[in-house]
């Protein structure tokens, strides 16, 4: 005999299956007679709402507005479609979702006390301890508002589509961990086997399987008889039930199970689900759980207390320092791509090699470089240049941005970051097809990112001023607000990135929301709050004898721009240190400056005398600069000093340039002018490029700009939330359409068509009826087919009939409209005094 082993299959998590079919619950069903005045369908429940409640539904579920439903019946049909219900379930908080899950395993319809017991237990002590009993009305009201639940408290109904998504099945276990009912588990079982179970359970035999299943269900739902039955069970049987009671309810058994398993199976406490699988019936599990649908309910949102508290002035100062660093970093990155930016990949985005180069330029990690590149892209400061060999380059907006005061520049970056759907944290990961996601690539949009960023800032704003939250507590709160698996996982990652990015950008300081960050969250201009926190730009530097210059603060323009060309940044911080090198001086000369200009510039802007080594360096590089000239032949070198050209030809390092003498003062090369310039500079010379006319080419850093392009538009998560104007118009249109659909009409003549359908009248009858209505000022009900072939019904009060058209006040659209007579399918008179 087999040893008999029973094991659970897999852990459960809160999850909503993806929409895969378009089947929907059009308007619910009555399932018997309802109480007096109780709605008999979802459409009837929606029709009984006032305009404010209907607008609340459309605000909570904006997908129902695309397009605006023609009447309440269409609204109810759309609200019960699978895709819309899945979207609505994904936006429920944990307790509202647990309430919906409890309704999915409750009787349909479910009285309020039964639902309450599923969430608080048979005695209610659990619910009293954690607040489930007090929170249930709020959760149920939320489900009603979103049209996921309808019916009065005696007959609470979950929309059929939501029940199908949340109810347990063998393929999709319920988040509650409950299994099928006795009736569902015994469906297809032989009548003989059912009678054997009934007999073993100590129940009298019945004359048919239906009454036998009913008797077994009655036993399992009777607490006293069920307790007596379980008292007879072996101790090992209780251990088996304990492993299945909280889910998963399915277990595997061997062909010859042990005695405890056989005892449970013989009495229906375990029912066969397949040849080697048994399931714990829902009624049995609820009895063992004390009537609870969930092991743990979470009726109250987890608090987000202040983990640390700082002085608000310290928070703002820290945020201001981060803001200055952010401005410097973004400017440095974009300027490094001014003349020869990285190439755009064929599929879009930045290559891994170019991202590493950007990280080296910024002295940052690749993840940080990706964030800064994405931020500049979101702010519209850089884009592809649109050329055949497309490269990234600054946009004209970058020049405008550079001229703004620092506080306004920071405000522009922060305002671009908060609503952006592009997510730099995904860079380096792989998509569903195994392709690596690249910075500035097309696959980085995550529509939930703006909502999560704003919610993180809102939670920080709810703390005392200067308070910083524990990230784990903040993530627990976000998980409670959106518990659906997949949705909650992504939101947790987005929240962590949002915390890091907000700190890096200066929206927060030391983990607390700064004053400018609070203004950003409240849709106010943050620049006036940030301006007093930032240091004033200075107009001078301190030159030192070791060929360095110290900037004691942010530099004014054009001082900062010129110094960035003339020297290299050696270190950053409260004071920036620049170092002068032969290469940096040559770069300034290439940009069109002369040695005289550079001496005058340093003398004007230095608070200390110009050191002699620096003056010698400038003069030495300037004396050699331009002595060699490089042009396009493929390329050539010309120099008045033929001895220098001979020296270059004799140098072994010039072998790769393919040089040969064309004339005493001219060398031809087999490489491009740019490569020739780089090669000669690597050899220690200071060549200058020249044009076709022999003039020296000035290589200005801002020579290359992409065409003017707007910042990328965020990809919204579904339809945008409608404003009050759109909601009001939509509610009026639905009400008017409902008026037309439910208008009381006179009984049509036998030739008018099928009663209750669109009237079918001849052209002559249609014309005569609308003319009579125009003369008497009465309204009629018409069927109309527009140019797209869409049929609709309308209540129209004609005022003029001429030229094949009828003009009148359309009660459905709440405005005067004109309709072609030949498109009217039929017309019927309304009952007197209906409108």
Image: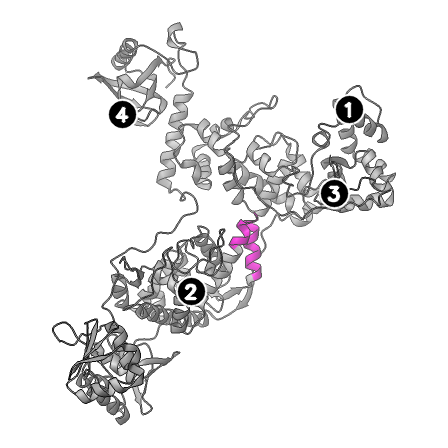
Task: Assign a secondary structure to mark 4.
Answer: strand
Determine which of the numbered discs, if any, sits on residue 467 in the image: none
Q: Earlier in the sequence, mark 4 or mark 2?
A: 2
Q: Residue 359 lies in what quarter of the image?
A: bottom left
Q: Observer-nearest residue: 506 or 154?
A: 506
Residue 196 lies, in percent from the top left, at: 83, 28
Q: CA distance from mark 4 to mark 1?
A: 66 Å
**Residue at numbered disc 1:** 191
The residue that disc 4 covers is 817
For mark 2, what is the residue? 352
Give whichever of discs 2 and 1 has the lower sequence position. 1
Please say whether residue 216 is visible from this viewpoint.
yes
Q: Which percent across, then down, holds residue 663?
A: 15, 81
Q: Tell me the residue that label 3 is attached to.
A: 251
Q: Main secondary structure of the magenta part?
A: helix
Closer to viewer: mark 4 or mark 1: 1
Residue 594 in magenta? no
Image depth: mark 4 or mark 2 in front:
2
> Which residue is depicted at the point 61% across and 22% down?
32
x then y, percent, for residue 764: 27, 9
Q: CA distance from mark 3 to mark 1?
A: 24 Å
Q: CA distance from mark 2 to mark 1?
A: 68 Å
Q: Is residue 564 visible?
A: no
């Amino acid at each position: 005999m087999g040893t008999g082993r029973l094991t659970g299959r897999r852990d459960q998590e809160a999850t909503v299956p993806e929409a895969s079919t378009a089947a929907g619950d059009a308007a619910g069903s009555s399932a018997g007679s309802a109480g007096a005045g109780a709605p008999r369908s979802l459409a009837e429940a929606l029709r009984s709402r006032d305009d404010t409640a209907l607008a609340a539904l459309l605000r909570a579920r904006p997908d129902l507005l695309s397009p605006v439903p023609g009447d309440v019946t269409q609204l109810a049909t759309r609200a019960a479609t699978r895709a819309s219900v899945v979207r609505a379930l994904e936006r429920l908080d944990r307790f509202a979702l647990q309430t919906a899950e409890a309704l999915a395993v409750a009787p349909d319809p479910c009285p309020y006390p039964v639902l309450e017991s599923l969430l608080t237990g048979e005695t209610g002590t659990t619910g009293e301890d954690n607040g489930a009993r007090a929170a249930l009305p709020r959760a149920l009201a939320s489900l009603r508002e979103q049209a996921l639940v309808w019916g009065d408290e005696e007959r609470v109904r979950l929309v059929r589509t939501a029940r199908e998504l949340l109810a347990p099945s063998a393929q999709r276990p319920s988040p509650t961990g409950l299994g099928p009912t006795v009736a569902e588990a015994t469906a297809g079982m032989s009548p003989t086997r059912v009678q054997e179970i009934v007999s073993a359970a100590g129940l009298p035999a019945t004359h048919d399987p239906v009454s036998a299943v009913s008797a077994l269900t009655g036993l399992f739902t009777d607490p006293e008889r069920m307790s007596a039955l379980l008292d007879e069970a072996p101790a090992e049987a209780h251990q088996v039930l304990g492993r299945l009671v909280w889910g998963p309810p399915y277990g595997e058994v061997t062909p010859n199970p042990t005695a405890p398993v056989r005892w449970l199976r013989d009495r229906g406490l375990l029912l066969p689900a397949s040849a080697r699988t048994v399931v714990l019936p829902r009624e049995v599990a609820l009895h063992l759980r004390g009537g609870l649908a969930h092991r743990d309910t979470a009726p109250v949102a987890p608090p987000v207390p202040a983990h640390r508290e700082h002085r608000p002035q310290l928070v703002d100062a820290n945020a201001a320092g981060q803001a200055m660093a952010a401005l410097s970093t973004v400017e440095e990155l974009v300027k490094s791509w001014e003349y020869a930016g990285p190439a755009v990949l064929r599929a879009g985005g930045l290559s891994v090699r170019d991202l590493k180069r950007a990280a080296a330029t910024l002295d940052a990690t690749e993840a940080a470089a990706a964030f800064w590149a994405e931020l500049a892209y979101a702010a519209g400061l850089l884009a592809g240049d649109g050329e055949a060999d497309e490269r990234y380059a600054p946009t004209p907006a970058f020049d405008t941005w550079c001229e703004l005061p620092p506080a306004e520049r920071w405000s522009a970056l922060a305002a671009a970051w908060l609503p952006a759907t592009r997510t730099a944290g995904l860079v380096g990961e792989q998509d569903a097809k195994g392709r690596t996601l690249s910075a500035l690539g097309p696959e980085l949009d995550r529509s939930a990112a703006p909502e999560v960023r704003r919610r993180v800032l809102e939670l920080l704003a709810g703390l005392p001023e200067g308070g910083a939250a524990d990230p784990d507590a903040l993530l627990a709160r976000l998980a409670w607000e959106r518990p659906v698996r997949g949705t909650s996982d992504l939101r947790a990652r987005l929240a962590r990135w949002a915390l890091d990015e907000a700190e890096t950008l200066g929206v927060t300081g030391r983990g607390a929301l700064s004053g400018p960050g609070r203004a950003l969250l409240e849709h106010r201009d943050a620049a006036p709050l940030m301006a007093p926190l930032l240091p004033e730009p200075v107009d001078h530097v301190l030159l030192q004898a070791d060929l360095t210059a110290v900037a004691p603060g942010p530099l004014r323009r054009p001082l900062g721009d010129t110094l960035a060309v003339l020297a290299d940044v050696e270190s950053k911080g409260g004071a920036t240190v620049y170092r002068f090198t032969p290469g940096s001086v040559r770069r300034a000369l290439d940009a069109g400056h002369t040695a005289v200009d550079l001496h005058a510039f340093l003398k004007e802007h230095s608070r200390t005398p110009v050191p002699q080594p620096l003056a010698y360096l400038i003069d030495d590089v300037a004396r050699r600069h331009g002595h060699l000239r490089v042009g396009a032949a493929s390329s050539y070198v010309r120099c008045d000093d033929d001895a220098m050209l001979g020296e270059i030809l004799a140098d072994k390092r010039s072998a790769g340039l393919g040089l040969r003498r064309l004339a005493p003062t001219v060398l031809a090369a087999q490489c491009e002018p740019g490569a020739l310039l780089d090669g000669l500079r690597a050899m220690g010379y200071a060549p200058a490029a020249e044009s076709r006319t022999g003039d020296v080419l000035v290589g200005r850093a801002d020579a290359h700009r992409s065409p003017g392009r707007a910042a990328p538009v965020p990809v919204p998560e579904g339809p945008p939330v409608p404003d009050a104007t759109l909601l009001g118009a939509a509610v009026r249109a639905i009400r008017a359409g409902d008026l037309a659909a439910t208008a009381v009409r006179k009984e049509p003549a036998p030739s008018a068509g099928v009663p209750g359908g669109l009237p079918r009248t001849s052209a002559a009858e249609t014309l005569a009826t609308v003319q009579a209505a125009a003369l008497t000022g009465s309204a009629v009900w018409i069927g109309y087919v527009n140019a797209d072939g869409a049929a609709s019904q309308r209540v129209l009060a004609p005022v003029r009939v001429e030229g094949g058209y009828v003009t009148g006040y359309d009660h459905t659209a709440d405005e005067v409209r004109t309709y072609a007579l030949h498109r009217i399918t039929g017309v019927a008179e309304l009952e007197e005094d209906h409108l």
